[in-house]
Structures are given as C-alpha cells and as structure tokens.
C-alpha cells in the first residue's frame, strides 16, 4: 500500500501539534505529500438571526485570512523539514469539507485528531471525527491528542 497524499486537517488548537509527529512519520515512511487543511466554520446561520449580511461576510473573510496566516506559521514551525507540503483553507462544515477535499485531491490517507468533546459542545458541534469516519472512502488514522503517551 502506498500513501502518496496524506491529509491532516487542523483546527489550530493546542491539540494539533500533538498529532504532527504521526503525520511526519507516516509521510517520511511513504514519501508522501502532506496536505494541511484548515476549515473555517460556515457563518451563514448568522444571517437568519438578524446579523447584517455584510457584517457576516467581513467576519468570515477575517477568519479565513487569520486562518491562512496561522496555518502558514503552523506549517513553517512543524513541517520545516518536509518539502512536499500543501496548505488549504476552506469555508464550511468541517466534516463535509474534509470529505470534499479527500475526493477533489485524490487523498490516500487521512490523519486527524479526536477532541473528545462532551456535553453542550458535542451537542452543538457534533464530532467531526465521527462524521468523517462514517463517510471517508480512504484509510484513516485517528489520534486522541489527550491520551498520547510520551
């Protein structure tokens, strides 16, 4: 089995760097291209609660630009020794956009973290990893960043 393209979706939380060693190791082992993906949450639902549309657009653009800058810094810091890096920032539902990216870019393997959301957080946001696991057509490595043994 050859994994030419590995997708690593990041949310830029403190959990993301904990998954980096696994991504680097797999990429090194298979001489893979690493695709780092940041999904900015879709803000369309704000327009239905009387937030003016131009305000939503401005905020959305600010989030995407901030995400672009942050993901570039993240890649420089954690993947400086990797030559085959691609960075992407998209807007939408995280699970849907991860699945879309896999299909559009012929990704061979997905490596992502679980965040163990509980209570109201899980109710509001659901589990991205759970949704992706059910829909992904490729092998997937899930890592709980809070349970990693050093």
Image (cartoon, rainbow, N blue to C red):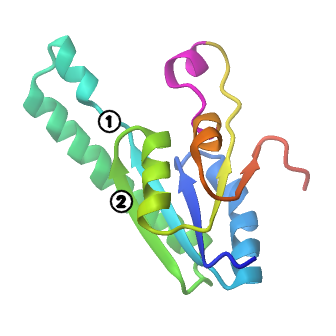
Q: Answer left or right for 109 relative to 48.
A: right
Front one among 29 and 147: 29
Residue 1: in magenta span: no
Residue positioned 69% across, 40% down in the render: 114
Nearer to us: label 2 or label 1: 1
Q: Position of residue 104 (x, y in %)?
A: 41, 63
Q: How far apart are the alpha carbons under marks 2 and 1?
A: 16 Å
The residue positioned 58% from the left and 80% from the top of the image is: 80
Q: Quick one: SS at disc 2?
A: helix
Q: For the point 56% across and 25% down, which residue is it?
A: 126
Q: Compared with residue 65, is residue 81 higher up or lower down, i.e. above or below?
A: below
Q: Position of residue 28 (x, y in %)?
A: 72, 82
Question: Is 117 situated above or below 79?
Answer: above
Q: Which residue is mark 1?
A: 42
Q: Which residues are magenta?
A: 120-129
Q: Is residue 129 above or below residue 139?
A: above
- Label 2 sits on residue: 68
- How dense is the environment of label 1, judged by Cα within 10 Å: few (below 14), some, or many (20 and up)? some
Secondary structure at badge 1 equals loop
């Amino acid at each position: 089995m050859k994994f030419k393209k590995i997708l690593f979706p990041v949310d830029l939380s403190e959990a993301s760097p904990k998954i980096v060693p696994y991504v680097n190791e797999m990429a090194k082992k298979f001489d893979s291209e690493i695709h780092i993906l940041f999904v900015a949450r879709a803000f369309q639902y704000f327009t239905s609660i009387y937030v003016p549309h131009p305000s939503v657009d401005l905020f959305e653009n600010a989030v995407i630009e901030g995400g672009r800058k942050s993901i570039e810094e993240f890649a420089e810091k954690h993947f400086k020794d990797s030559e085959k890096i691609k960075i992407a920032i998209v807007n939408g539902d995280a699970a849907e956009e991860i699945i879309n990216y896999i299909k559009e870019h012929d990704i061979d393997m997905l490596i992502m973290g679980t965040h163990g959301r509980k209570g109201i957080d899980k109710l509001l946001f659901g589990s991205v990893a759970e949704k992706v696991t059910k829909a992904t057509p490729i092998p997937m490595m899930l890592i709980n960043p809070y349970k990693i043994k050093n």
